[in-house]
Image (cartoon, coloured by chain):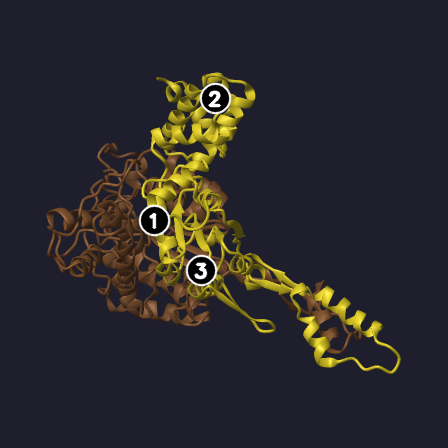
Chain colours: A brown, B yellow
């Protein structure tokens, strides 16, 4: 969009003569913030310093100065572009307006229009969940605070009784030990302290660090009764990881990631960091556009693998997919993506609440397609099954 | 050319002369980072020339390039400095051995000589601070962990480090710092705020052709064009790992080695391994080569 064919900058003043330059620029920074980019005062200050370098006469320069100082993520670039256009040409975006970009990390996808309707035999058997895998994406916000008392009690008991240890992996940093490999440095250093007299040998062994856990929680209609509880479970683990390393420390946060899947993929890790579970679920509920909508499991898993998984979030992690595997039509893509995630992840755990039901057989096309690539297939419908799930996770 | 360039244009020209064709706006942002003495955080798909920028800037400004490759578990002693303990012990033994009969070892002097420059193992960050001019490349910072980011933030805010035994080392002129990230993990906000940010896109078709021809001057123009076009189409195919410019360059080099003048179905099929690094991707593309290479 921006003009920048090399061969000289486009000299075009961005500030009309007579206007207060600082006011205009600070106003622009505020507009960018209103467009959903977290612009802090120090970023604004950096922006002013950068503009002082390029000069206000150079429109292109101002654009790049702002883009490099006010933005800090790829997701910020589009809101920034729009805000720049609006502020320096049309001036249509004003501070404080509700803005259309405040839906972070929602990966947009095509509509489900071409998926064939009609019932196969499997669908007939699944009367109860049939309505859920609909092809209309229900873009509505759900009030996650509305739970009946019984469910609330159950969740409380569940949270109280659960052991939320994270799985461990080998760390590259070593630690002291009674046996293992010779710790040359420590041995020598102690020897040095004694003036070079030889002494006992010291040993090191490789340390252990928590392994990353990634939750993918299906929030489509067919999973509606369980999604809430599963997110609470994920929240418990996010908080436990954060508290183990000191409340709110960045390191703890990186260890548990939570995404919701439905017709879209939404990252809710940040929302899940609220200390209070109700606040966390409320924040997540506001962020998730496709609560109780349909599913496009295969496509969403591909979006996850492309955007997050392959880049490293899923690498070596324990991947927990909570879904009933309800996929309309062709399951080739779903199977392909699960196979791929299985290769990326250290362990793939599939939680299917319907598995816990009496007489359940994994005959549904979706779940049958993914089962060969799943390490652990667990139920997720009762407190007992969550205890089992946590044991599986701790041992993974 | 030496030192910081006068303007963004002159930096762009200097980069061009080293064979690096900067991304749109990248020269401006890099120049701003130099002027404001702030680190430059480059994010983008693998193979879009993030690391190459640091190399090109170093070459263009006549600065020394110091590279720090990050990995999980990296810590300050691998980035900053370390003492060569073995040599220190040997030194102590030498002092003991060399003293004459009845003489005493001068404790203070001996101690002082232990923590001498020559026992100091300089690691990349310290080397960059002590070399002027220099370019410090912190590669793949997303692979390190949060403790290391905090440490980096400290160094990059003050451009100084303190070695208890020697004192504080402060950079005469702060090095030009380039951090690259493949976005496998979000870099911490505090570190991001300290940096200027730039997202490096895959280049446009015409720029990619230019890049191929600049980096590999011996390549027949037609071949460069064909490879760039094919690479562009591959990026739109929804592959597991779309090829970057680095892969296009490799591909052209392979074709040149084979003595190919043209990219046809046959030569493409045998050299596909240079661009596609996943079996699934290769399988998918192999059956469809005619369409990809058409026109």
Q: Residue at x 39, y 58 (%)?
A: B37
- In this rendering, do the residues under marks 3 and 1 share a single chain? no
Res. B278 visible in picture: yes
Which circle marks residue B268 in the picture? 2
Q: In which quarter of the view is residue A8 placed?
A: top left
Q: Which residue is drawn at 17% across and 49% down?
A: A14
Q: In which quarter of the view is residue B259 placed?
A: top right
Residue B109, compared with residue A253, is above or below; it is below
Total marks shown come to 3
Please give the chain letter of the residue carrying mark 1. B
Q: Which residue is drawn at 10% across and 56% down?
A: A18
Please give the chain letter of the residue carrying mark 2. B
Residue A65 or residue A311, whichever sits in front: A65
Residue A51 or residue A102, whichever sits in front: A51
Residue A375 or residue A173, whichever sits in front: A173
Q: Earlier in the sequence, mark 2 or mark 1?
A: 1
Q: Do the residues labelled 2 and 1 touch (CB within 8 Å)?
A: no
Q: Is mark 2 on a helix, strand or loop?
A: helix
Q: Distance between the residues labelled 3 and 1?
A: 33 Å
Res. A326 visible in picture: no
Q: Name the residue under label 1.
A: B29
**Label 1: few (<14), some (14–19) or many (≥20) C-alpha neighbours in 10 Å:** many
Image x and y of residue A90, in percent: 11, 47
Q: Name the residue under label 3.
A: A255
């Amino acid at each position: 969009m921006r003009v920048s064919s090399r061969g000289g900058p486009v000299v075009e003043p961005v500030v009309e003569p007579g206007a207060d330059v600082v006011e205009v620029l600070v106003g622009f920074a505020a507009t960018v913030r209103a467009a959903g980019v977290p612009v802090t005062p120090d970023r604004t200050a950096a922006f002013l310093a950068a503009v002082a370098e390029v000069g206000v006469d150079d429109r292109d320069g101002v654009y790049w100065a702002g883009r490099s100082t006010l933005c800090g993520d790829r997701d910020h670039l589009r809101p920034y572009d729009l805000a720049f256009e609006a502020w320096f040409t049309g001036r249509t975006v004003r501070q404080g307006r509700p803005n259309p970009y405040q839906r972070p990390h929602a990966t947009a996808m095509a509509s489900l229009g071409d998926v064939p309707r009609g019932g196969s035999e499997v669908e007939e058997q699944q009367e109860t969940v049939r309505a859920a895998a609909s092809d209309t994406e229900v873009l509505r916000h759900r009030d996650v605070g509305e739970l009946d008392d019984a469910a609330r009690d159950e969740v409380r008991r569940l949270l109280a009784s659960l052991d939320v240890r994270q799985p461990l992996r080998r760390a590259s940093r070593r630690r002291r030990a009674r046996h293992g490999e010779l710790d040359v440095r420590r041995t020598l250093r102690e020897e040095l302290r004694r003036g070079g007299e030889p002494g006992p040998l010291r040993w090191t062994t490789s340390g252990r660090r928590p392994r990353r856990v990634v939750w993918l929680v299906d929030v489509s209609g067919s999973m509606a009764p369980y999604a809430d509880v599963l997110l609470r479970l994920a929240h418990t683990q996010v908080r436990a990881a954060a508290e183990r390393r000191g409340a709110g420390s960045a390191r703890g946060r990186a260890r548990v990631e939570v995404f919701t899947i439905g017709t879209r993929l939404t990252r809710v890790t940040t929302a899940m960091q609220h200390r209070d579970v109700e606040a966390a679920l409320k924040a997540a509920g506001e962020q998730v556009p496709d609560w109780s909508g349909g599913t496009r499991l295969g496509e969403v898993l591909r979006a996850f693998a492309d955007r997050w998984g392959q880049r490293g979030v899923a690498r070596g992690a324990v991947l927990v997919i909570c879904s009933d595997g309800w996929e309309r039509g062709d399951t080739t893509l779903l199977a392909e993506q699960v196979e791929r995630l299985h290769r990326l992840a250290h362990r793939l755990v599939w939680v299917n609440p319907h598995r816990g039901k009496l007489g359940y057989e994994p005959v549904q096309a979706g779940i049958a397609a993914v089962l060969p690539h799943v390490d652990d297939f667990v139920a997720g419908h009762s407190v007992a099954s969550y205890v089992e799930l946590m044991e599986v996770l701790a041992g993974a | 050319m030496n030192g910081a360039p006068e303007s963004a244009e002159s930096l762009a020209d200097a980069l061009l002369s080293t064979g690096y064709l900067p991304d749109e706006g990248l020269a401006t942002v890099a120049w701003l980072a130099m002027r404001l003495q702030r680190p430059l955080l480059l994010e983008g798909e693998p193979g879009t020339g993030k690391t190459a920028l640091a190399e090109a800037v170093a070459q263009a400004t006549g600065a020394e390039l110091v590279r720090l490759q990050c990995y999980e578990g990296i810590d300050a002693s691998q980035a900053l400095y370390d003492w060569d303990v073995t040599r220190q012990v040997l030194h102590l033994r030498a002092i003991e051995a060399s003293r004459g009969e009845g003489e005493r070892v001068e404790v203070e002097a001996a101690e002082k000589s232990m923590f001498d420059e020559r026992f100091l193992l300089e690691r990349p960050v310290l080397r960059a601070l002590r070399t002027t001019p220099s370019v410090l490349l912190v590669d793949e910072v997303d692979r390190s962990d949060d403790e290391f980011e905090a440490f980096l933030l400290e160094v990059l805010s003050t451009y100084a480090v303190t070695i208890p035994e020697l004192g504080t080392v402060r950079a005469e002129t702060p090095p030009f710092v380039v951090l690259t990230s493949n976005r496998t993990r979000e870099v911490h906000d505090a570190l991001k705020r300290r940096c200027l940010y730039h997202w490096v896109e895959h280049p446009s078709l015409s720029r990619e052709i230019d890049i191929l021809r600049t980096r590999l001057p011996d390549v027949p123009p037609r071949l460069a064009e064909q490879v760039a076009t094919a690479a562009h189409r591959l990026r739109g195919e929804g592959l597991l790992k779309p090829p970057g410019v680095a892969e296009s360059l490799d591909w052209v080099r392979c074709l040149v080695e084979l003595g190919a003048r043209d990219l046809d179905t046959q030569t493409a099929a045998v050299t596909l391994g240079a661009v596609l690094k996943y079996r699934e991707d290769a399988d998918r593309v192999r059956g469809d080569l005619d369409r990809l290479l058409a026109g």
